[in-house]
Image (cartoon, grey):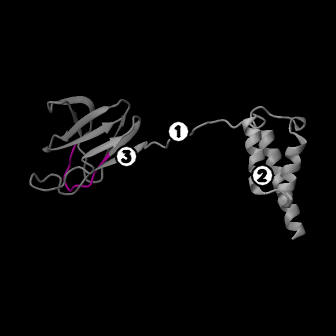
């Protein structure tokens, strides 16, 4: 048991020294008060409670002996998304809509359309009135073919298949 507490004391001391030495203000060993070093040692030996040790760390942070940057990692963003043209999409009476029908993605996302239907399709960008515009337009996609477009601006983008004009989809970019 004695060996375990010494190992713990060494680990805690290494942690305390690492935290202090890695702080932004690069505090020197002289800047670390003796009571801090002792508290870390005593915590490792089981003399000081965890609460007392954490209060010491809190004191060091509040008095900027240890400086912690508040660097927030950006939330992971979807960079690739997919729309599937399901089998049966060509049939006007079928329920083979684009999947998803309205794809919602963040700016900068590359959308890939995949033709899983048994007949060719294309992806044609259209305006509010349904007129084809030259934003993104694929060649005919045979079964298994893919078409990609990267959305760099916010907005609602409509598209359809000119071979099967009753099939309309949306990409909403925010």
- Quarter holding residue 17: top right
Q: CA distance from mark 1 to mark 2?
A: 34 Å
Could you tell which of marks 3 and 2 lies nearer the N-terminus? 2
Q: Residues within 10 Å of mark 2 (few under 14, many from 20)?
A: few
Asked if residue 117 is among those painted magenta in the image, a careful observer would answer yes
* Secondary structure at numbered mark 1: loop
Please tell me which residue lies in front, 168 or 118. 168
Q: Which residue is mark 1?
A: 74
Q: Which residue is mark 2?
A: 52
| In this view, the mark in front (3 or 2) | 2
Q: Residues within 10 Å of mark 1 (few under 14, many from 20)?
A: few
Residue drawn at the location 61% of the way across and 36% of the way down: 71
Q: Which residue is mark 3?
A: 81
Above/below status of 150 relative to 90? above
Could you tell which of marks 1 and 3 lies nearer the N-terminus? 1
Q: Which residues are magenta?
A: 113-122
Residue drawn at the location 78% of the way across and 46% of the way down: 56
* Secondary structure at numbered mark 3: strand
């Amino acid at each position: 048991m004695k060996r375990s507490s010494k190992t713990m004391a060494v680990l805690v001391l290494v942690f305390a020294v690492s935290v202090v030495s890695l702080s932004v203000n690069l505090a020197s060993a002289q800047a670390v008060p003796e009571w801090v070093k002792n508290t870390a040692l005593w915590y490792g030996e089981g003399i000081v409670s965890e609460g007392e040790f954490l209060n010491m760390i809190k004191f060091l942070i509040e008095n900027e002996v240890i400086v912690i940057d508040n660097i927030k990692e950006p939330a992971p963003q979807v960079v690739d998304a997919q729309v599937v043209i399901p089998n049966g999409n060509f049939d006007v009476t079928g329920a083979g809509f684009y999947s998803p029908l309205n794809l919602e993605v963040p700016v900068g996302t590359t959308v890939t359309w995949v033709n899983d239907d048994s007949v060719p399709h294309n992806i044609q960008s259209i305006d509010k009135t349904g007129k084809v515009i030259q934003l993104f337009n694929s060649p005919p996609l045979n079964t298994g073919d893919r078409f990609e477009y990267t959305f760099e601006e916010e907005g609602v983008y409509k598209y359809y298949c000119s071979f099967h004009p009753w099939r309309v989809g949306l990409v909403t970019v925010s």
